[in-house]
């Protein structure tokens, strides 16, 4: 089986079962690499390279590449910037519109490549610099304000809580795992809410103590998170207070620092 592939469309759903009706557990963005673990006539079960997430997808949305191309880490450094007009144009003139944080494989001199296919990159891509995290994290997060909440989403047309913080971190050169329940296992504990600072992640649990939500601290009393839409709300030791609902919407469990 040819197992090395890369996503060749702007955004592709990753599903829990091999069916178009199945729940979307995450999304692949253009340039995301996967290893195919299993294949049926239409579907393949894949594992993502960037966060080891597994799910089913339609294999027509993938481009096969060689093991050498898959493993060439240096060739996946450039990503699309924080703006609304990240365009690729094929040699035949077709246009792809990409979300911020999409990978541009083998980018060089204004072009990126998937297998033998060449794409002209119309907007300036960049290599994220972790040294700029603190300087740029607030503006990067606020770019997504009012993006609608979408379970499994990773783009500004729909993003979930963990996809939101994962994407913001990726745009600043930091890797996070996919789900809030996985993200909370990493990072350093921040003892008190009063000590929280810009860029820290706050995690929230349900009655059973299961982590069900994550957001990014803007200060020790404000948080930006995806709930209904990407929004900014006040936070205290109890949790997130939603002014529109006039009540607490999420119960604070723990704050972690990753930078």
Image: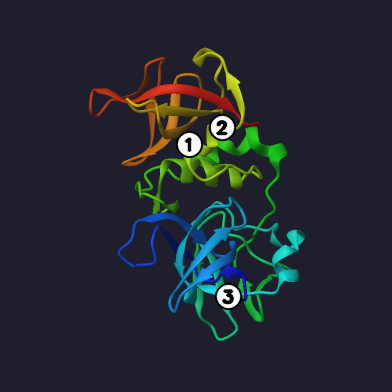
Q: Residue furthest left?
A: 245
Quick check: 194 above or below 147?
above
Quick check: 111 above or below 210?
below
Could you tell me if the residues under marks 2 and 1 are in contact, i.e. CB atoms within 8 Å? yes
How far apart are the two marked residues, 3 and 1, measured between alpha carbons? 31 Å
Find residue 228 and report its image quarter.
top left
Left-right relation of 246 to 156 = left
Residue at 36 percent of width and 49 percent of height: 151
- Asked which secondary structure carries label 2, the reply is loop
Residue 185 image label: 2
> Label 1 belongs to which residue?
181
- Between 89 and 4, the residue placed more toward the observer is 4
Q: Quarter of the image containing the N terminus?
A: bottom right
Residue at 65 percent of width and 37 percent of height: 133
* Residue 127 percent across, percent down from the top left: 70, 53
* Residue 108 percent across, percent down from the top left: 74, 68
Which mark's residue is nearer the viewer, 3 or 2? Answer: 2
- Closer to the chain start, of discs 3 and 2, is 3
Residue at 60 percent of width and 47 percent of height: 170
Left-right relation of 235 to 90 = left
- Between 95 and 235, the residue placed more toward the observer is 235
Residue at 41 percent of width and 14 percent of height: 237
* Circle 3 residues within 10 Å: few <14, some 14–19, many ≥20: some
Q: Quarter of the image containing the C terminus?
A: top right
Quick check: 204 above or below 123?
above
Q: Can residue 109 be seen by looking at this rendering?
A: no
Residue 63 image label: 3
How far apart are the two marked residues, 2 and 1, measured between alpha carbons? 7 Å
């Amino acid at each position: 089986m040819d197992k090395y592939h890369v996503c060749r469309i702007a955004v592709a759903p990753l599903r829990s079962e091999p069916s178009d009706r199945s729940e979307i557990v995450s999304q692949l963005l253009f340039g995301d690499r996967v290893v195919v673990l299993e294949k049926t006539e239409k579907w393949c079960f894949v594992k993502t390279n960037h966060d080891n997430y597994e799910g089913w997808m339609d294999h027509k949305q993938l481009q096969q590449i060689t093991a050498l191309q898959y493993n060439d880490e240096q060739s996946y450094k450039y990503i699309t910037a924080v703006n609304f007009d990240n365009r690729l144009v094929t040699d035949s003139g077709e246009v792809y519109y990409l979300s911020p944080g999409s990978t541009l494989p083998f980018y060089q001199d204004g072009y990126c490549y998937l297998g033998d296919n060449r794409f002209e990159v119309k907007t300036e891509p960049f290599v994220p610099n972790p040294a700029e995290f603190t300087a740029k994290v607030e503006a990067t997060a606020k770019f997504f304000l009012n993006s609608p909440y979408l379970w499994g989403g990773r783009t500004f047309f729909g993003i979930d809580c963990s996809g939101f913080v994962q994407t913001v971190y990726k745009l600043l050169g930091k890797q996070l795992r996919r789900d809030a329940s996985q993200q909370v296992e990493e990072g350093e504990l921040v003892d008190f809410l009063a000590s929280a600072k810009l860029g820290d992640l706050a995690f929230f649990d349900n009655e059973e103590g299961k982590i069900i939500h994550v957001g990014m601290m803007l200060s020790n009393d404000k948080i930006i998170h995806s709930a209904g839409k990407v929004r900014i709300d006040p936070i205290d030791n109890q949790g997130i207070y939603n002014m529109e609902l006039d009540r607490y919407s999420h119960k604070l469990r723990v704050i972690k620092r990753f930078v």
